[in-house]
Amino acid sequence: MSDPGTPAPGRSARISAKVLDRILDNSFVLGPWLRLLRSARPAKKKPGELIHGVDDVPAPIAIFLLGTQHVGLLRIQLIYPLLVIQLAGLSPEASVNMLSLAMIALGIAAILQSLPAGPVGSRFLCPSCHTEIFLEPSIAALKLGGLPLVFGMTMVAGAVQSALSPMLRRVRPLLPPEIGGLVVFFVGTSVAAIGCRYIMGVGAREPVGRDYWLVGALTLATTVGLNVWGKGPARVYCTIIGMAIGYAAAVATGLLPMEHYRMLSQLSFFAVPRLDYGGWSFSPAMLAPFAIAALAVTLKGIGDVTACQRINDAEWVRAEMGSISRGSLANGLGNVLAGLVGSLGLSPSTANIGLQAATGVSSRVIGFAIGGILIVLAFFPSLTGSLILMPRPVMGAALLFSSCFVLISGLQTITSRMLDARRTIVIGLAIASGVAAEIVPGFAADIPAGLQPIVSSSIVLGTVAALLLNGIFRLGQRQRVTLPLDAAAPDAAAQVDEFFAGAGREWGARPDVMVRVSFGINQAIETIRENCEPEGPVTVEARFDEFNLDVKIAYRGAPLELSDERPTDREIMETEDGYRRLAGFLLRRNADRVRTSVKDGTSILEFHFEH
Amino acid sequence: MKLVEETAEGVTVVEAYGRLDSTTAKEFGDRLIALVQAGRASIVLDLKNIAYISSAGFRVLLIANRATAEKQGKLALCGVIGEVRRLFEIGSFTEQFLICQTQADGIGKLRQ
């Protein structure tokens, strides 16, 4: 990945990180734990833009600061339980207690996602947040059966998502990389849309004015300025510095009025969260909306974990379904827990994925810090209350900044494949659907409430549209293509190029692999023509699945010799044998596997390319 | 295949366009040898517009390289990028040739 503007690690940062790593590794207490954290190392190539990759352990102060930064972003989404709390008419004390419980659920969910081993967790820094996807079903459940029904059905949704998670491994063929990229792109647009709404004051309770926009603009300008022109820590912590300056500007301009501080002073400093909201209840009438919400969160999670994979692997080519499946299970269990402690449903936090791309720090260990900070904060109501005071334009600026990196990552993935008309239409229509969900007012007004979770989110609607269209367009798609070729024809090479370019677009293949294939087949045809005296046409047959591309060349004539050793320069220049052996050597080195055989007078040359 | 030739600072610069395979290699090699025999043994060959090079192409490049050396000249390659670069690497040809980034670099190296 080449995210423009992501900070590159400085020399001093690299040295201090190495020294710290050594100290921590030798620590009696932390050493074994850190080695376990690193044991999940997936042998991926860390992109140069990342300062700390998923397996790295930054300095403790950095872990704390970055954890706090992530908690600040997660806090924004507490607006959804807050909305339901307000509708339920709870007292301020009860409201803060519920938020504390919600933070405990968030904390445990963040830790589950970051677990370095075992069947649960994506193994990435992929904390969960509250989501608008569960808002409509939760409000409906609140009206039907009060908070106990909301919490009970949230547990059911969690159970549904957990049950779906093992099946995700089997949908791999339905999720080609360009659709993975599309989902990441939607994750980016979704974050950008939230950021724009917040920074512009759309949907704010009171009309916003110059000061509001000024605070947002100052936060954004500071963050962008530090990221582009800053050096060292200023660049790494550009988002948190920008947010701090924005917060100070909000206080200075009166965006945070004094009554908010008075409200804070009335809250207890320390209190153990109480589970006293009346238990759980269940209703078959609420099963469908919550199951659909669980499906929607699962689809969104595919994109979020894919984005994590993309951020952490410079050589990422396709979604790794094991990580996605475990991440979905972690989120499902997180939702069961959320319902159990009395909170709303969760989904992986897209904004936090954007934040790790923006800061260049994606260390899994920060997930544990996030969990710890959230759980500790849950016992300090006045601190929990202070989180609610984070000004919206400040959060909007942070989200808008984060979205840039996720958006570009998604676009790079989409364009990393060759696209024919079918695939272009799938991507184009899916983008149109997703964009419609974000920008067309009343787009989903007439859709039944039970389907609202699908049509109200650009990520979910766009993904559903892409999966459906892809499923339809897979009909009639050829995985095996054949080219009968006159090897002596003057345009034989052009025919081969055209044949593989067309097949590559139909398959959505990687262009770099198709270039290798074209070279190999052209070199083989050239060598057969000059050395093997072929009778009749040469048949080129190619078979493709997402992981393998196999090409078989069959002709009637002498078999080709494929040399393991490169002939010397003198042999190449002066002898026909040396020249011929060079061709065989190139063919062998170009493909991942080559095999020759003869059957009934027909020579067969088989090439295997890993895809 | 198309060849565009010019002389700069006493060095012959040849820009090659198209495919360098068994159907074009002979004509291409003959032209390079003719340049050497005409006393223009310092040659910068720009391959940035070459889309494909096969074993036949490598053979003529080796022959041309030897011919320039025999006349106390040198063959410098530039524009060895992308797929052509990969083929140079898998064929272990990167050490055999003087490979430069640009035509100007090549000219500079040959004038040293």
Image (tube, rainbow, N blue to C red):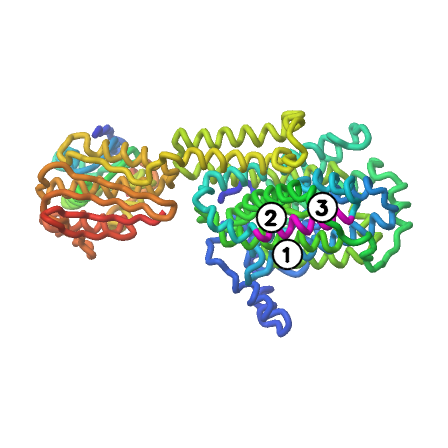
Magenta: main secondary structure equals helix
Tag 1: residue type? Answer: Ile
Q: Do the residues indicated by labels 1 and 3 lie within the same chain of the protein? A: yes
Q: Earlier in the sequence, mark 1 or mark 2?
A: 2
Indicate whether residue A359 is drawn in magenta: no
Q: Residue at x 33, y 43 (%)?
A: A544
- Nearer the observer: mark 3 or 2; the answer is 3
What segment carries the magenta color?
Answer: A148-163
Tag 2: residue type? Answer: Gln
Q: Is residue A428 left or right of residue B48?
A: right
Q: Residue at x 20, y 42 (%)?
A: A523
Q: Do the residues indicated by labels 1 and 2 lie within the same chain of the protein? A: yes
Residue underneath mark 1: A366
Q: Is residue A604 visible?
A: yes
Residue A407 numbered tag: none
Indicate whether residue A157 is drawn in magenta: yes
**CB-based contact (under 8 Å), mark 1 and mark 3:** no
Quadrant position of residue A392: top right
Tag 3: residue type? Answer: Ser
Residue underneath mark 3: A283
Helix, strand or loop for disc 3? loop
- Work out whether residue A397 or residue A91 is closer to the camera in this orientation and state it: A91
Residue A356 numbered tag: 2
Q: Position of residue A108 (x, y in %)?
A: 68, 57
Tell me the crowding category of disc 2: few under 14, some 14 to 19, or many 20 or more residues within 10 angstroms, Cα based: many
Distance in Å between CA atoms under marks 3 and 2 = 39 Å
Quadrant position of residue A497: top left
- Work out whether residue A471 or residue A534 is closer to the camera in this orientation and state it: A471
Q: Position of residue A584 (x, y in %)?
A: 18, 50
For disc 3, the chain is: A
Q: Position of residue A527 (x, y in %)?
A: 15, 43
Q: Earlier in the sequence, mark 3 or mark 2?
A: 3
